Amino acid sequence: MARVPTNVRLFGEYLLGEQSPITEKDFTHQELSEMLRMVQEQESRNVQEEANLQRSLTAYQRNLETFDPSKNLVQDEKGNLVPKYTEKEYNDEVQKNIKDIERKLDSYEKTRNKTAVGYRDERTDSAGLKIVDAISKSFTSPAYNIETSLGNFSAHKNKDGTVSIKDTYDFLGYGHDKPVKISMSDFLKSLPLAITRPEAFGTLLSRVFLADRKRDVDITLDNKAKTAKTFKESLD
């Protein structure tokens, strides 16, 4: 007998008012492994991006006070070539870029042991997949189950080598920290589209009728994302 997909089971428990934290035991070994892979891949991207920013900072610092009026020429109204910037404008622009890069580098330093993981697939429709595709993905794609269970999440490195994911299972949407409520009139307007897309329907249903409901997420991953036999796998 095929087990109920993680995203479906967790949403069902949410509707029933389950309050216990969601842990690593709620996911299969494959999903935990994919979760860890997502974290590691994002870490690699962060390292590369930080290195790129550092190179850009060095380049801009070298360019400071090196204004050359013969470069960056543009045509004026009469068609004559003139410098695009005055020396002050040039240096101000370089300083602005330096401060922007330093701000981004500082954010990396402040979150050194934290990795923010977003959706891996490029979605062309924010409402999510259509029913048939969503059902197929739920049974075959560990990444899709993670995305539709955790959404965007943050992972923290621990001193013992494990990775902790502490989040909240809710339907507030990215960037929201308070209930996102939808009026009944807006619910009825959105319903025709939502009933063809499970993700949109679940979000719509929750924001109208269960806007204040939430559930803690407390997942621990080891280096190989291996745990004791999970709840889901014990159902087989």
Image: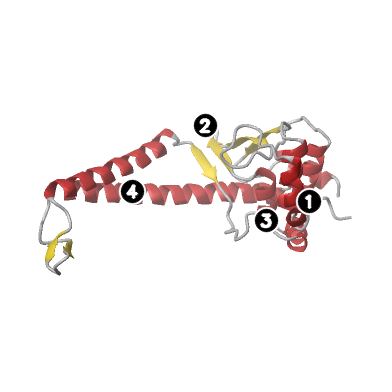
Closer to the eye: label 2 or 1: 1
Q: CA distance from mark 3 to mark 4?
A: 33 Å
From the top left corner, tell me how far across and down residue 212 is, in percent.
Answer: 72, 31
Q: Residue at x 32, y 43 (%)?
A: 100
Residue holding disc 1: 5
Q: CA distance from mark 4 to mark 1?
A: 41 Å
- Disc 3, disc 2: CB below 8 Å? no
Neighbour class for label 2 at 10 Å: few (<14), some, many (≥20)? few
Q: Residue at x 59, y 44 (%)?
A: 152
Q: Is residue 81 above or below residue 116?
A: below
Identify residue type, mark 2.
Lys
Identify residue type, mark 4.
Leu
From the top left corner, tell me how far across and down residue 23 is, in percent.
Answer: 71, 36
Identify residue type, mark 1.
Pro
Neighbour class for label 1 at 10 Å: few (<14), some, many (≥20)? some
- Quadrant in the picture for residue 195: bottom right
Q: Is residue 72 above or below residue 199?
A: below
Residue holding disc 4: 53
Residue holding disc 2: 159
Residue holding disc 3: 128
Q: Secondary structure at mark 4?
A: helix
Residue at the limit of the structure toward the bottom, as seen here: 79
Q: CA distance from mark 3 to mark 2?
A: 37 Å
Q: Is residue 87 above or below residue 129?
A: above
Q: Secondary structure at mark 1?
A: loop
Q: CA distance from mark 1 to mark 3?
A: 17 Å
Q: Residue at x 75, y 39 (%)?
A: 208
Q: Secondary structure at mark 2?
A: loop
Task: Work out whether mark 3 precedes mark 4 in sequence or the reverse, and give the earlier one.
Answer: 4
Task: Work out whether mark 4 precedes mark 1 in sequence or the reverse, and give the earlier one.
Answer: 1
